[in-house]
Image (spheres, rainbow, N blue to C red):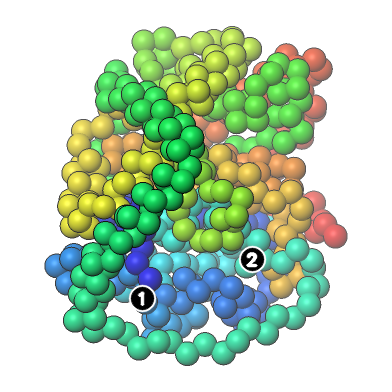
Amino acid sequence: MDPLSPQDASFLDVEDEVSHMHIGSVGIFEGPPPGREEVLEAVRSKLHLVPRYRQKVRYPPLHAGPPVWIDDPHFNLGYHVRRTALPSPGGEEELRTLVGRVMSQQLDRSKPLWEMWLAEGLGAGRWALVSKVHHCMVDGVSATDLLTVLLDAEREPKPIVGPGWQPRPEPSAAELLAQPLARRLVTPVSAAAAIGALLRGPRQVAELAVQTVQGTLAMSGVLRQMPPSSLNGPIGPHRRWDWAEAQLSEVKQVRGALGGTVNDVVLAVISRGFRQLLLSRDEDPGRLEVRTLVPVSVRRPGERGTYNNRVSAMFAELPIGVEDPVERLEAVRLQMEGLKRSHEAVAGEVLTSLSGFAPALLLALGMRTVLRLPQRSLNTVTTNVPGPQQPLYLVGKRMLEAVPFVPLGGHVRVGVAIFSYDGTLKFGVTGDYDTAADTGVLCQGIEDGIAELVAVAGRPAPSRPPKRTLHEAPAAQT
């Protein structure tokens, strides 16, 4: 039995009938689609590399301790890897609708918390793989690591033969209750050892303490509520999904000519998208503010390859009131530099770590209370995860595009996830089905923002063909 960390468990605790805490992605592959048994065998051969995919979550009686991972004695790969098809003509609209419906369904807590949907029927014989996995298992960075494990770096990789798997017996209620009690007896010893380690590095402790205080003071500003707008309000369980795209070379061109980082450019064009969205809703961006949660990985180099959450957060205010694209980028750059100096992410990590000393039941109640508060202090979430820059394959089929999915929670009606793969940036936009039917306006605004900055960066934006639909795709690449 492996206990979930406090941060991992929090993603279970905040989930309810409308806030589903799974993240996901959509990979578009060259065709024709593989057979069901081919896909099952390809996934089966990698399962020993991802033990969590055959484990489920159990809670001790009375929530006396954190939830734990246990082997699922009834694990059935065929349940998790599913097959479906898009209606004709099988273009972008049909794919968007399918993904929205799949992501609207909560994962079954009685089984391992992941699914894969192989969708046939895309134009030119192409197919899609829709993946969803609960946030308690992975964060954005470890999800990228997971992607590179489940897929292949070569079209014809060497066969992998994993060891045989035999599930461990499912623990009884008494055993589930005994483990947290035993852990509490060990906690004072662990705490003493941790204090000893801190005393052996006083300089590092002092630096961390200063950074934590600075970050906590900076985060206190998040309690200030934003002006009311259509971006916040009650949401339902159903989702819409859309995407925008840019070339990574374009973003780097802008960065080189105008300054800032790739992340600064990304936030600047997202600001342009939200500005366009609010204008289309007859709301004045000059009188509004849009505060976004920006997840920040605190995963250290030696922690790559571990599939859990190692993430903190910063809170940025998108300059939607700035009309000029260069001034907008500069406003983002200055703000992000200030947030980095304030050490918000460090404070978030330390506070999350301290939460491990609180009783699990109190943590669960606290997280649910926070999520249900009327939330006008946070308007959206924007998460940017760098992905692999080389092609990946599944059963010999090349993945041509990869688009992310970000969950919604609380009173946040629109969220944006950014993922880079093989030279392309994809902006996956999630919207509440009933209150954000116009996510396409946000996507168009993002692409317009990229074009504006590329033009200003020194040369006109490269001529692009009209946004192609999937059934107009070029022939499969090799």
Residue 475 image offset from top left, x and y in percent = 82, 56
Q: Identify residue type, mark 1.
A: Met
Do residues under tags 1 and 2 come within 8 Å of each other at their CB atoms? no
Label 2 sits on what residue type?
Val
Task: Tell me, yes or no, if residue 361 can be seen here.
Answer: yes
Element type at marker 1? loop
Marks 1 and 2, how far apart at CA: 24 Å
Placement of 35 over or under 292, stated as above or below? below
Q: Where is residue 442 in the image (x, y as percent from the top left)?
A: 50, 30
Q: Mark 2 points at which residue?
A: 149
Q: Can residue 17 be seen in this view?
A: no
Label 2 crowd (10 A; few <14 / some 14-19 / many >=20): some
Please give the name of the residue rendered at 69% of the width and 18% of the height, measured from the top-left corner. 259
Residue 229 in the image: above or below residue 147: above
Above or below, comparing residue 86 to residue 449 in the picture: below
Question: Left or right: 307 with respect to 124?
Answer: left
> In what quadrant of the picture does the C terminus appear?
bottom right
Q: Which residue is drawn at 35% across and 45% down?
A: 352
The answer to whether residue 110 is left or right of residue 349 is: left
Dot label at residue 142 = none
Choose between 364 and 416: the one closer to the eye.
364
Q: Mark 1 points at which residue?
A: 1
Query: Given this view, does label 1 or label 2 mark the residue nearer the observer?
Result: 1
Which of the 4 quarters of the picture holds residue 361?
bottom left
N-terminal-most mark, 1 or 2: 1
Quadrant the N terminus occupies: bottom left
Task: Tell me residue 101's x, y (percent).
Answer: 42, 56
Residue 419: name its quadrant. top right
Which sits in the foreground, 32 or 384? 384
Who's the residue at 33% across and 24% down the image? 217
Which of the pair 107/97 is nearer the observer?
Answer: 107
